[in-house]
Amino acid sequence: MVKPTRVTNRIRALRFARDEMTQAELAAAVGVTRQTIIAIEQGKYSPSLEMAFQIAQALGVDLGQVFQYPGREQDD
């Protein structure tokens, strides 16, 4: 059984804010499968640091706007 990650993300909301980008479109932009994007969105998988940066870049935002880790104060 896979242990869920403590890292949370806003990928789904950011995809919709970006002209309703689909999971398949994001996956193609990052070079992974749609299933990988689904697992990351659901918190079942943590991407590598490189993949996290690629996701943020594909969404047109900074890394900190996509991924959050508990206990860290967010800069507004």
Image (spheres, rainbow, N blue to C red):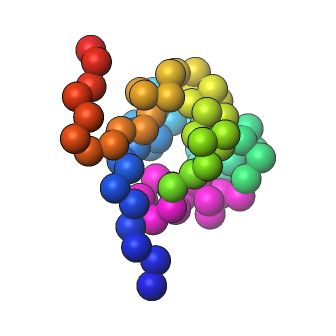
In the image, residue 9 lies in the stretch drawn in magenta: no
Query: Would residue 23 be seen by someone viewing this image from the given angle?
Result: yes
Quarter of the picture containing the C terminus is top left
Residue 27 spot, x, y in % from top left: 68, 47
- Determine the residue positioned at 65% across, 43% down: 51
Query: Would residue 19 be seen by someone viewing this image from the given angle?
Result: no
Residue 44 spot, x, y in % from top left: 45, 65
- Determine the residue positioned at 42% across, 38% down: 67
The correct choice, above or below, for 62 with respect to 68 in the image is above
Quarter of the picture containing the N terminus is bottom left
Residue 66 image-quadrant placement: top left
| 9 or 21, nearer to the observer | 9
Residue 25 image-quadrant placement: top right
Q: Main secondary structure of the magenta part?
A: helix
Residue that lies at the very extreme toward the top in this rendered image: 76
Please give left or right for residue 33 compared with residue 40 in the image: right
| 36 or 49, nearer to the observer | 49
Tally the marks.
0
Residue 36 spot, x, y in % from top left: 62, 59
Residue 28 image-quadrant placement: top right
Please give left or right for residue 16 compared with residue 23 in the image: left
The correct choice, above or below, for 36 with respect to 19 in the image is below
Please give left or right for residue 70 compared with residue 61 in the image: left
| 32 or 2, nearer to the observer | 2
The correct choice, above or below, for 1 with respect to 67 in the image is below
Residue 60 spot, x, y in % from top left: 58, 21
- Determine the residue positioned at 34% across, 56% down: 6
First to last magenta residue range:
33-45
- Determine the residue positioned at 77% across, 46% down: 31
